[in-house]
Image (cartoon, coloured by chain):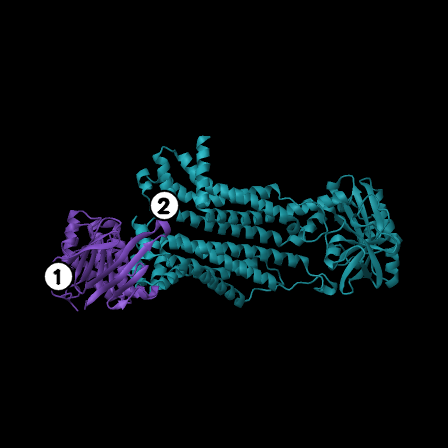
């Protein structure tokens, strides 16, 4: 597929060995086009999160290939993988995984600082993104003083701060109530409209319904692959850095 | 009883789950209590060894020495035996000053006491090997023989005459080797000198052969041995012995003089013991702090099933107390084994060396203090936390430090993460600095002790016979420094691993956001090195201060280059030591760490 941001071929991930062997991901082929929003659904333990970790270079596959932006990453060193995560991938986790002793703005600017951005530029981007997700007034708050929905919005802002090619979201609404879920859905809809490539692992039909494409997983394999919506204009469309 | 059993079972289960921690506590307390017990027992043991030797050799209460010799001197000394407070005596006898050469190479000053072949009722040297003097043969004092490396059957040359060594003996009438002379020729000062015995006739012949200096002595037993110290004052000025300027040596003086050889050993051991105790508390407290969340959950569980505060405190403290008391017992056993060597650097005394009661009590207090100081904070925290909160306790989140975060933002990733990691636990950073300072102080003092110029015990200060006191001090200082460095290494590994485990969620997030394993490894090492830096800088003046405490007029001060080298070497070693645990921690799977954090 030309323009594929993510491509996987014969992807396998096993845990354990012998009788306790678990085939978390079993011979999966996948391509995600630039600007596409892909939802991955399936029952608990079917391998969705493991697939996401493999695509983002957080886990190494037992077999198969993973390509991000035309570069094969499953053979890269840990150092090079870190570079891929810095520049090309943004993660959103179900448990938010914010650094508790850092404020919302400090959390959002952290990936930019790790990528070598100047503190001034990192803070500018962080404040802009917090404004986009409706949390400009909470920039100095610690995560412990934010609601679940607010924390997840901070995590989304953090995932976007380095302008990644793809955002990988693992159950982003799994820990949220209805109001917070709707707020996160609104942000994902904006990102989708802006042409941001998204891979979302979810149990939530409402989240899946916002995707361009839905794949279903069971026992580590894809059992269904459905296109849900027509293609939209590509490019971030000024969502992130309108001032640039 | 049931509660106690439960506390013990919980403690044993904890030990099984954390064997490395129990081993570390055991090791720390063992070395600290052993060193402390040794240091505090030294003087008591020296007294005990002297008392044992005195009893075994019918040691005199007072030895009266005159720098001169001849019939008038002997008569004057003998007239002391007419006093009603003198109940027995030995002598007067001749003391000849000569040079002794052993194995054709090692030469030393020696005093030869002319004794009867059948010793009298007072000052009966105990033969520990061979037999007592006979015509043509000599007996060497045991400490002297040991230093010379001479035994029964060897030959020694005294003032050019060759004598077979027929026996080895000890006496309480003189100070330990190398202070056997007590006074020098003609009553002047004496050099480091060994002691030998010959028959009275042989001693006389020896003196006449080379016209050697001779002094005279008599050994007295008093009706009241406790009055020996004041005996000299009871001899009137017009007594005949006063003409010959006598020197009075009471048994109390000799017992006290034995301790001269231990002058530096006690502070080395006692201060070393305190420093080791401090490092033990530091390391164990760090481990205990790293288990606060686990301890709090356990306390919550016990509260939930109806346990009272007493049982909870016992359950949480028993593990530490049991390990500390086991270490204490082991430490005392080691101290008992090491005491004969440490308390008696020469072989001039006989008897068993046991830790004194005071030392055992102090070591017990130290062991309990290590356990309680290390575990009290986490235990109180666990007991004070509400049951429901305790059941869900997780690691305490560090404070928000906006200024530090802003200041570190422009730094390279390893320093950015390292500084923020170090600031998460400021108390631990202080302990880390103190550990480094302690190590630098110990190494500086060791280097300084080794740099001191010492007069050997051989002829004219030759080092062919080494200075036993200096050698003893250097060996003790080396042993203490090795123990301190060993505990510091254990502590550094503990600091790094505990920091890595506490920060694993943050580090996993940093890696998910793009930090490399190398950057995380360097950050974890930097988090240990940064507090170590002021510690190393502080250790240099502290090391100099310790030198000043023990310096005498002719002491050689530590060179600035040594102190700088000690500080730099300690920092480099810290960097090297932190690398392995930091690397291990940094290479853990990010996905699994994040999953564990979410669970």
Chain of the residue under the numbered disc 2 shown in the image: B
CB atoms of marks 2 and 1 within 8 Å: no
The vertical placement of A205 against B155, above or below, is above
Which residue is rendered at x = 40% and y = 49% of the image?
Answer: B290
Mark 2 vs mark 1: tell me if same chain. Answer: no
Q: Secondary structure at mark 1?
A: helix
Q: Quadrant of the N terminus of chain A?
A: bottom left
**Residue B527, located in which quarter of the rendered image?**
bottom left
Looking at the image, residue B347 sits to the left or right of residue B361; the answer is: right
The residue wearing badge 2 is B293
Looking at the image, residue A218 sits to the left or right of residue B214; the answer is: left
Chain in purple on the image: A
Q: Secondary structure at mark 2?
A: helix
Q: Kindly identify which numbered label has been placed on residue A193.
A: 1
Question: What colour is chain B?
Answer: cyan
Number of labels in the image equals: 2
Looking at the image, residue B455 sits to the left or right of residue B205; the answer is: left
In three-dimensional space, the C-alpha distance between marks 2 and 1, rounded to whole angstroms, equals 45 Å
Q: Residues within 10 Å of mark 2 (few under 14, many from 20)?
A: many
Residue A226 in the image, given as x and y percentages of width and height: 15, 57
Residue B91 in the image, given as x and y percentages of width and height: 84, 48
From the viewer's perspective, is the residue at label 2 or at label 1 nearer?
A: 1
Q: Kindly identify which numbered label has been placed on residue B154.
A: none
In-front residue for pair B5/B276? B5
């Amino acid at each position: 597929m030309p323009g594929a941001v993510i491509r996987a071929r014969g992807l396998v991930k096993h845990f354990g060995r012998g009788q306790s062997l678990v085939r978390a991901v079993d011979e999966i082929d996948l391509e995600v086009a630039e600007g596409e929003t892909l939802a991955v659904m399936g029952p608990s333990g079917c391998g969705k999160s493991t697939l996401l970790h493999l695509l983002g270079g957080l886990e190494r596959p037992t077999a198969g290939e993973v390509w991000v932006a035309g570069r094969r990453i499953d053979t890269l060193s840990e150092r090079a993988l870190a570079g891929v995560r810095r520049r090309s991938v943004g993660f959103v986790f179900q448990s938010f995984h914010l650094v508790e002793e850092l404020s919302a703005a400090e959390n959002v600017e952290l990936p930019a600082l790790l990528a070598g951005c100047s503190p001034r530029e990192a803070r500018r981007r962080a404040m802009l993104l917090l404004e986009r997700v409706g949390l400009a007034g909470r920039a100095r708050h610690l995560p412990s003083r934010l609601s679940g929905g607010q924390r997840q919005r901070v995590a989304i802002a953090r995932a976007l701060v380095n302008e990644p090619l793809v955002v990988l979201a693992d159950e982003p609404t799994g820990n949220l109530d209805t109001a917070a879920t709707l707020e996160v859905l609104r942000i994902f809809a904006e990102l989708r409209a802006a042409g941001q490539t998204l891979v979302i692992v979810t149990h939530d039909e409402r989240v899946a319904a916002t995707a361009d494409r839905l794949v279903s997983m069971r026992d580590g394999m894809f059992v269904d692959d459905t296109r849900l919506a027509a293609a939209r204009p590509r490019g971030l469309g000024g969502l992130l850095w309108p001032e640039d | 009883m049931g509660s106690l059993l439960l506390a013990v079972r919980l403690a044993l289960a904890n030990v099984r789950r954390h064997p490395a921690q129990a081993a570390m506590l055991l090791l720390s307390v063992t070395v600290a209590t052993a060193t402390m017990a040794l240091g505090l027992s030294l003087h008591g043991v020296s007294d005990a060894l002297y008392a044992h030797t005195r009893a075994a050799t019918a040691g005199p209460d007072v030895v009266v020495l005159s720098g001169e010799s001849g019939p008038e001197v002997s008569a004057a000394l003998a007239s002391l035996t007419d006093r009603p407070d003198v109940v027995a005596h030995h002598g007067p006898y001749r003391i000849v000053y000569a040079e002794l050469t052993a194995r054709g190479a090692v030469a030393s000053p020696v005093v030869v006491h002319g004794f009867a072949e059948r010793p009298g009722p007072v000052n009966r040297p105990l033969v520990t090997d061979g037999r007592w003097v006979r015509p043509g043969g000599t007996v060497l004092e045991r400490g002297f023989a040991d230093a010379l490396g001479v035994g029964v059957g060897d030959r020694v040359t005294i003032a050019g005459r060759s004598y077979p060594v027929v026996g080895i003996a000890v006496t309480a009438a003189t100070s330990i080797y190398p202070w056997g002379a007590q006074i020098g020729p003609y009553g002047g000062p004496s050099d480091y000198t060994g002691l030998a015995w010959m028959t009275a006739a042989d001693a006389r012949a020896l003196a006449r052969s080379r016209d050697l200096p001779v002094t005279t002595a008599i050994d007295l037993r008093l009706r009241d041995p406790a009055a020996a110290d004041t005996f000299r004052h009871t001899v009137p000025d017009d007594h005949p012995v006063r003409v010959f300027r006598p020197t009075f040596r009471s048994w109390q003086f000799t017992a006290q003089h034995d301790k001269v050889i231990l002058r530096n050993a006690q502070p080395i051991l006692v201060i070393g013991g305190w420093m080791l105790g401090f490092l033990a508390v530091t390391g164990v407290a760090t481990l205990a702090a790293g288990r606060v969340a686990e301890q709090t959950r356990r306390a919550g569980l016990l509260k939930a099933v109806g346990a009272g505060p007493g049982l909870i405190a016992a359950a949480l403290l028993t593990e530490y107390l049991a390990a500390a008391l086991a270490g204490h017992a082991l430490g005392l056993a080691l101290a008992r084994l090491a005491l004969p060597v440490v308390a008696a650097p020469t072989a001039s005394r006989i008897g068993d060396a046991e830790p004194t009661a005071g030392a055992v009590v102090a070591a017990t207090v130290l062991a309990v203090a290590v356990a309680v100081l290390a575990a009290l904070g986490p235990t109180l925290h666990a007991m004070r936390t509400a049951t429901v909160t305790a059941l869900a306790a997780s690691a305490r989140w560090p404070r928000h430090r906006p200024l530090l975060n802003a200041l570190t933002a422009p730094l390279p990733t390893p320093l950015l993460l390292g500084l923020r990691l170090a600031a998460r636990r400021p108390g631990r950073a202080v302990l880390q600095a103190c550990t480094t300072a302690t190590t630098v102080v110990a190494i500086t003092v060791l280097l300084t002790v080794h740099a001191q110029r010492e007069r050997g015990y051989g002829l004219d200060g030759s080092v062919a016979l080494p200075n036993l006191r200096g050698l003893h001090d250097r060996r003790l200082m080396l042993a203490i420094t090795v123990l301190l460095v060993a505990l510091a290494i254990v502590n550094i590994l503990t600091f790094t691993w505990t920091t890595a485990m506490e920060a694993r969620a943050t580090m996993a997030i940093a890696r998910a956001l793009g930090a490399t394993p190398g950057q995380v490894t360097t950050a974890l090492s930097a988090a240990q090195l940064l507090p170590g830096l002021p510690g190393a800088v502080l250790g240099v003046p502290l090391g100099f201060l310790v030198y000043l405490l023990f310096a005498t007029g002719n002491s050689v001060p530590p060179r600035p280059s040594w102190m700088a080298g000690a500080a730099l070497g300690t920092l480099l070693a810290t960097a090297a030591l932190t690398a392995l645990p930091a690397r291990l921690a940094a290479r853990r799977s990010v996905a699994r760490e994040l999953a564990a954090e979410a669970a």
